[in-house]
């Protein structure tokens, strides 16, 4: 099953990938950012959803995703804690990218990104090198997203981050053309057009 705004992966609904950056895909795992959070707008309803979002966003491998889902099934309390922490830091990141986070949120996000960076070690091979986490933990999906967030927050592309003005949306995307207004014209753009047409018809 898929829609213009959602895909289904292993039976779990995930937001469609359309932001242009993995850190923004984490933010887009919730819809309706200008309103208080509601369950209907939440995609991270389980640890499985978090792990699959990380894999589809390219921040962890499919093999790591499968292993983490097994680990979460064996430690449901730990999985719940990791999921709740992800939602909290997701809100901090969204605020940092779209407004001015308060001192508590700023400190919490900064410390979390620093902790994620500290977990990495460099793996040197014959003709390549890569950064990896040490032993796998249930925080791996969040920490992988946080590393992407740190890169985005400290580069020029941060100025291109744009929130969709669509009703019950607020999804973020990199506005590389500087002309894009909606996350998807076929969804939020058309809804706005229909609403404007209805308003004109009433008058």
Image (spheres, rainbow, N blue to C red):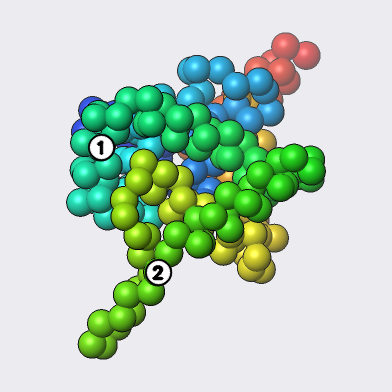
8 left or right, relative to 190: left
The image position of residue 196, as x and y in percent, is 68, 25
Q: Residue furthest bottom?
A: 127
Residue at coordinates 38% horizontally, 25% vertically from top-left?
Answer: 77
Q: Toward the viewer: 113 or 119?
A: 119
Q: Mark 1: few, some, or many residues within 10 Å (few <14, many ≥20)?
A: some
Q: Earlier in the sequence, mark 1 or mark 2?
A: 1
- Using the rendered image of the protein, determine whether residue 22 is visible from the camera's viewpoint: no
Q: Quadrant of residue 138?
A: top left
Q: Mark 2: few, some, or many residues within 10 Å (few <14, many ≥20)?
A: few
Q: Toward the viewer: 40 or 180?
A: 40
Q: Quadrant of residue 114?
A: bottom right
Q: Residue furthest top?
A: 202
The image position of residue 98, as x and y in percent, is 71, 45
Badge 1 element: helix
Circle number at residue 121: 2
Q: Which residue is under mark 1?
A: 71
Q: Toward the viewer: 186 or 85?
A: 85
Residue at coordinates 64% horizontally, 59% vertically from top-left?
Answer: 153
79 left or right, relative to 179: left
Split into 4 quadrants, where in the image is the N terminus?
Answer: top left
Residue at coordinates 58% horizontally, 34% vertically from top-left?
Answer: 88
81 left or right, relative to 69: right
- Using the rendered image of the protein, determine whether residue 80 is visible from the camera's viewpoint: yes
């Amino acid at each position: 099953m898929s829609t213009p705004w959602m895909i289904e992966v292993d039976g779990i609904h995930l937001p469609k990938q359309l932001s242009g950056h993995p850190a923004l895909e984490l933010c887009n795992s919730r819809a309706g950012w200008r309103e208080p959070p509601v369950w209907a707008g939440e995609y991270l309803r389980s640890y499985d959803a978090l792990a699959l979002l990380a894999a589809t966003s390219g921040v962890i491998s499919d093999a790591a995703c499968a292993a983490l889902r097994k680990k979460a099934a064996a430690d449901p309390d730990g999985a719940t804690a990791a999921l709740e922490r992800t939602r909290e830091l997701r809100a901090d990141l969204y605020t940092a990218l779209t407004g001015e986070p308060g001192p508590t949120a700023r400190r919490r996000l900064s410390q979390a990104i620093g902790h994620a960076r500290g977990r990495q070690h460099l793996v040197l091979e014959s003709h390549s090198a890569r950064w990896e986490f040490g032993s796998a933990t249930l925080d791996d999906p969040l920490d992988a997203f946080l590393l992407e967030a740190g890169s985005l927050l400290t580069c020029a592309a941060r100025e291109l981050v744009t929130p969709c003005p669509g009703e019950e949306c607020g999804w973020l995307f990199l506005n590389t053309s500087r002309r894009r207004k909606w996350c998807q014209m076929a969804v939020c753009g058309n809804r706005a057009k229909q609403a404007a047409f209805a308003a004109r018809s009433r008058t």
